[in-house]
Image (cartoon, coloured by chain):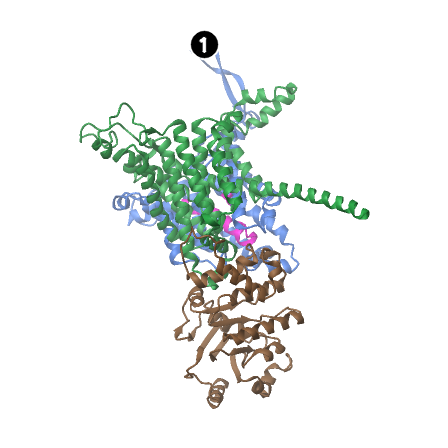
């Protein structure tokens, strides 16, 4: 009996198997390999509505690959990703985003030539107008409502001092906060966060945790990939542990803390 | 849209309009105030503004925009031959046809980005050029170029030797000698022709201004900045790119049409890829991505082309006549490389100098100079403050 | 069958020229990451190396003829090449006749130096600049080069002849038992063999020398090779010089087929870029394959039988193929992943 099957049995015991009505994201038996290297194998994962689901695991465990499969950057070799009744597999990134899945990138991928405000307004317009709208005579400066909303979000991530500064002049940490703002303004049904606090100072990390907690009250579902266990255990409702491309454990933070397999996988990595 | 124009926007638009309209007087001191050159400046200004909507905003470098100039010219001359010498239908049909072709070419070319896109557009332009010289000669009249003729007296005369001009004939307009293009009776040669082009240039400038300041324009800028990220924010970039390509193709079609309006002949050499290269140079010379830059670049290039290519050694000897003989001969010898037939050499050097030293174009240069002055002024102000402080 | 074979032959020499130019373009693009729009101008300058050598051999002085007189009985002036004066008529005539093959040596030296100067003086400053800037600056350079050539050599094509030994046509059909219908000019056959040898030489150089190994590694992953502490700069210069020399000899040898003029570089450049894109950006074998393929396709398209069905197809076939290939195989025939895909 393989490890994967083992886990699925465990899941059954805990009642996490698919078929639960309020699940938002359902990753079904996803496989992905690069040149023979299995980055993901037999990955099954359910994310419930409104929860914050953390995916943790050692480096190279396949966390980023899993996220890339979810947003359409990578196509899985097998399996499917189902979001809110729609199959995401095979859809292009903009379609997936329009369905309500936003992603916050690990290495900040902001629009360097645009100002902070413009950076946040672009995703807001995308949310309102859809994937394409030919409006060459609709003034950008005239978007009062969206502009105000963007300013509010920028305020909430603490970038209001740099509202009209070009993004290219920002520090890396500030770009990450801008990334977060670009995700938040879309009020996505599902927000995928790829190590939102990596490289941040402790103070900023705590600010980000507080911010994410605040959104949680708003009922947004979040999947968060994180190295920092402090962040994970402050935020996560449930945790999945990925190692060697497989999910080796899944459960509440307390369950994960006490799971021997997790300790084994993390031996030599961060101690839980 | 208009309600969100700031005071500076209005100043820019009005200032631009005034400068264009007074060009016939303003350019007199530098000997450029003759209709032919003024028309060219206005027409290529339109071309460059349109090209900038694609290249300046999205960063996609098309090497095939001259094809749309050619299409605009041919459609216009055919409109003169078949319908009427009135330019209005010619302009509308040309812009429409350019839009159709731009959509087709853009739809295919924009499936790729970067250098692949440049090569694809180049391939399409070369195809059009080659076809115009070979199979399409019944439409393009090959190397001779397509020209307007007198109305044919019988159906037996080939369309190449006699025109139909159905609308003009139906309206009973009499023609004496070589027919001249007109705008409801106003002849489109000389200064009226320039003013026709100038008004269209101002309208085109206004539209480009609106586009740049619109949501659509913001998306185009975001494409240039990080197309990949834009996909993940839910934007489908291809329709935006195709729209930008079609709009800039329509500008080029209009420019081609106006070339035919001011001088009713169309030749395939307008579609050659060197012509595409020229509009790239105009845009980067003035400053890609800026509003005024492309027009400035077009004006400078067209002015320099007319002037430099008309100079000869005699003029050079005059210019350096103050120098001793040996030095004078040396300078004349050296500069004779660059004038007259050597105009293209000058163009090549200009190209390199701009790309190497001033990638942002003249507008960027102006901004840099302005910021130096501003800095000096603030420095002085600081000094004044520093001096003033102890007294407080 | 004969006709088909003949068309394949017809495509080979042109294909050879395309392949040689595309090879250099790809080499430069793959190692240096630079899109060189002046590469066609290098081909053109190579052609004019052949013209120059011919002119050098022809440098003459005037003297009063001992034998010839005009109709009034006055002695005529005649031009005698210095070579003839120094080495006798046999040597002089031999050199003149063989000036095109000999110009290969001149082209290698001259174009190699031109390439090195170009890389040191201009290209190296553009490694980090966007591709659009590279295209624009080399486009400007191409205009300058072709205008300088026009200034010195005039605008008209200057025909060059192949050595008499290769004049006329070879009865290729008889060699392979297809009858006497397949005859083909010797020189164009030579050009094909020559281009194949050069291509083979370049590949062997890249395959079997340490230098070539580094270059190939650089084409795979430029940054890593740079990090290994290998002096990549110097190698870049040599690669550029090599590419320029290859374009140069390709041009020099092509002169008997196509009389060189100042704008032939631009004409060939556009086609060669299409060849590179069809072959797959960054793939050397793709460039060679596509060069010959497109050359042959073009010669088929210019058959009268084909033209009568699809008029004008000969004018656009290459571009049409490029469009189709790019839309169906986005990376070209043999392109690698990740090249020029931002």
Task: Answer with left or right where residue C211 lies relative to residue B148.
Answer: right
Left or right position of B363 against A45: right
Q: Residue at x 53, y 28 (%)?
A: B339
Which of these two is toward me, C164 or A102?
Answer: A102
B341 or A143: which is nearer to us?
A143
Q: Position of residue B234 (x, y in %)?
A: 45, 63
- Say above or below: A207 vs C199: below
The quarter of the picture where residue C303 lies is: top left
**Which color was chain C given?**
blue
Can the viewer see residue C267 in this picture? no
Give the image location of residue A120, x and y in percent: 53, 61
Q: Residue at x 45, y 26 (%)?
A: B34
Is residue C163 found inside the magenta-colored segment of the image?
Answer: no
Taking the magenta stretch, the answer to whether it contains residue C30 is yes
Residue at the extreme bottom: A13
Judging by colour alone, the chain drawn in brown in this rendered image is A
Main secondary structure found in the magenta portion: helix
Q: Which residues are magenta?
A: C12-39
Colour in which chain B is drawn: green
Q: Determine the chain carrying the residue at label 1.
A: C
The reply, left or right, for residue A265 in relation to residue A42 is right
Place of residue B116 in the rendered image (x, y in percent of width and height, measured from the top left): 45, 52
> Residue furthest toward the top?
C72
Instruction: Report the residue marked by disc 1.
Output: C73
Q: Secondary structure at mark 1?
A: loop
C94 or B23, which lies in front? Answer: B23
Rendering coords of residue C298 (x, y %): 36, 46
- Residue C17 lies, with reference to residue B232, above or below; the image says above
Q: Which residue: 40% across, 43% down?
A: B251
Q: Can residue A233 be seen in this snapshot?
A: yes
């Amino acid at each position: 009996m393989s490890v994967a099957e083992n886990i699925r049995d465990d899941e059954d015991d805990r009642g996490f198997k698919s078929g639960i009505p309020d699940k938002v994201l359902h990753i079904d038996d996803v496989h992905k390999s690069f040149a023979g290297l299995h980055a993901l194998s037999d990955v099954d994962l359910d994310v419930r509505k409104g929860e914050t689901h953390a995916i943790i695991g050692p480096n190279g465990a396949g966390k980023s690959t899993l996220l890339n499969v979810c947003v359409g950057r990578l196509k899985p070799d097998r399996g499917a990703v189902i979001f809110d009744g729609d199959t995401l597999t095979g859809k292009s990134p903009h379609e997936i985003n329009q369905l309500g899945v936003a992603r916050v990138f690990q290495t900040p991928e902001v629009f360097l030539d645009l100002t902070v405000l413009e950076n946040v307004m672009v995703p807001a317009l995308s949310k309102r107008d859809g994937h394409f709208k030919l409006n060459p005579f609709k003034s950008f400066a005239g978007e009062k409502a969206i502009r105000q909303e963007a300013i509010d979000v920028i305020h909430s991530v603490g970038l209001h001092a740099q509202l009209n500064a070009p993004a290219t002049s920002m520090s890396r940490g500030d770009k990450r906060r801008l990334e977060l703002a670009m995700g938040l303004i879309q009020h996505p049904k599902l927000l995928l966060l790829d190590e939102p606090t990596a490289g941040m100072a402790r103070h900023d990390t705590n600010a980000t945790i507080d911010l994410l907690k605040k959104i949680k009250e708003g009922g947004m579902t979040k999947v968060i990939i994180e190295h920092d266990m402090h962040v994970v255990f402050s935020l996560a409702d449930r945790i999945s542990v990925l190692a060697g491309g497989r999910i080796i454990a899944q459960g509440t933070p307390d369950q994960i803390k006490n799971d021997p397999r997790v300790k084994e996988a993390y031996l030599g990595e961060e101690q839980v | 849209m208009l309600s969100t124009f700031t005071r500076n926007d209005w100043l820019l638009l009005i200032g631009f309009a005034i400068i264009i309209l007074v060009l016939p007087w303003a350019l007199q001191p530098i000997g450029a105030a003759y209709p032919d050159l003024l028309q060219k400046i206005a027409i290529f200004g339109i071309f460059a503004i349109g090209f900038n909507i694609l290249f300046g905003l999205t960063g996609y470098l098309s090497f095939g925009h001259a094809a749309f100039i050619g299409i605009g010219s041919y459609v216009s001359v055919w409109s003169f031959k078949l319908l009427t010498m009135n330019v209005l239908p010619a302009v509308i049909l040309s812009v429409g046809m350019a839009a159709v072709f731009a959509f087709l070419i853009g739809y295919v070319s924009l499936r790729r980005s970067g250098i692949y896109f440049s090569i694809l557009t180049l391939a399409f332009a070369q195809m059009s050029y080659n076809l115009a010289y070979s199979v399409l000669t019944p439409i393009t009249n090959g190397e001779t170029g397509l020209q307007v003729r007198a109305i044919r007296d019988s159906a037996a005369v080939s369309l190449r030797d006699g025109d139909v001009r159905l609308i003009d004939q139906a309206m009973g307009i009499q023609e004496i000698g070589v027919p001249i293009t007109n705008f409801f009776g106003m002849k489109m040669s000389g200064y009226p022709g320039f003013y026709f082009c100038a008004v269209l240039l101002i309208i085109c400038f206004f539209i480009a201004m609106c586009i740049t300041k619109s949501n659509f324009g913001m998306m185009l800028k975001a494409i240039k900045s990080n197309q990949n990220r834009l996909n993940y924010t839910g934007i489908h970039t291809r329709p935006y790119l195709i729209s930008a390509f079609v709009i800039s193709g329509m500008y080029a079609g209009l420019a081609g049409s106006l070339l035919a309006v001011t001088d009713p002949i169309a030749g395939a050499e307008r579609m050659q890829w060197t012509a595409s290269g020229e509009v790239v140079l105009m845009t980067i010379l003035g400053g890609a991505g800026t509003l005024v830059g492309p027009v400035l670049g077009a004006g400078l290039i067209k002015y320099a082309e007319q002037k430099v290519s008309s100079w000869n050694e005699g003029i050079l000897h005059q210019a350096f006549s103050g120098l001793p003989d040996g030095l004078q001969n040396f300078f004349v010898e050296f500069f004779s490389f660059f004038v007259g037939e050597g105009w293209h050499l000058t163009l090549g050097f200009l190209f390199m100098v701009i790309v190497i030293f001033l990638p942002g174009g003249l507008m960027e240069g102006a901004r840099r100079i302005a910021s130096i002055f501003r800095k000096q002024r603030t420095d002085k102000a600081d000094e004044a403050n520093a001096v003033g402080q102890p007294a407080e | 069958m004969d006709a088909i074979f003949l068309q394949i032959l017809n495509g080979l020499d042109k294909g050879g020229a395309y392949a040689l130019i595309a090879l250099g373009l790809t080499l430069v693009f793959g190692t240096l990451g630079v899109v060189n729009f002046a590469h066609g101008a290098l081909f053109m300058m190579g052609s004019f190396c052949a013209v120059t050598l011919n002119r050098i051999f022809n440098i003459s002085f005037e003297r009063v003829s001992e034998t010839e007189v005009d109709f009034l009985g006055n002695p005529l002036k005649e031009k005698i090449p210095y070579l003839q004066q120094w080495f006798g008529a046999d040597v002089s005539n031999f050199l003149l006749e063989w000036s095109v093959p000999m110009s290969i040596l001149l082209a290698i030296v001259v174009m190699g130096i031109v390439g090195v100067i170009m890389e040191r003086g201009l290209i190296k400053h553009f490694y980090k600049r966007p591709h659009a800037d590279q295209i624009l600056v080399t486009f400007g350079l191409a205009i300058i080069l072709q205008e300088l050539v026009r200034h010195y050599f005039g605008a008209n094509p200057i025909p060059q002849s192949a050595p008499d030994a290769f004049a006329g046509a070879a009865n290729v059909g008889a060699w392979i038992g297809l009858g006497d219908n397949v005859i083909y000019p010797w020189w164009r056959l030579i050009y094909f063999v020559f281009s194949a040898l050069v291509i083979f030489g370049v590949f062997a150089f890249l395959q079997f020398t340490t230098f070539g190994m580094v270059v190939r590694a650089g084409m795979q992953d430029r940054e890593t090779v740079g990090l290994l502490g290998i002096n990549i700069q110097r190698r870049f210069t040599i690669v550029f010089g090599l590419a320029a020399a290859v374009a140069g000899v390709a041009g020099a040898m092509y002169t008997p087929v196509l009389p060189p003029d100042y704008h032939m570089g631009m004409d060939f450049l556009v086609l060669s870029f299409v060849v590179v894109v069809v072959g797959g950006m960054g793939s050397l074998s793709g460039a060679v394959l596509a060069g010959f393929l497109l050359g042959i396709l073009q010669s088929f398209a210019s058959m009268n039988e084909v033209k009568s069905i699809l008029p004008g197809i000969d004018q656009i076939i290459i571009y049409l193929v490029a469009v189709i290939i790019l839309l169906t195989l986005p990376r070209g025939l043999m392109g690698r992943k990740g090249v020029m895909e931002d």
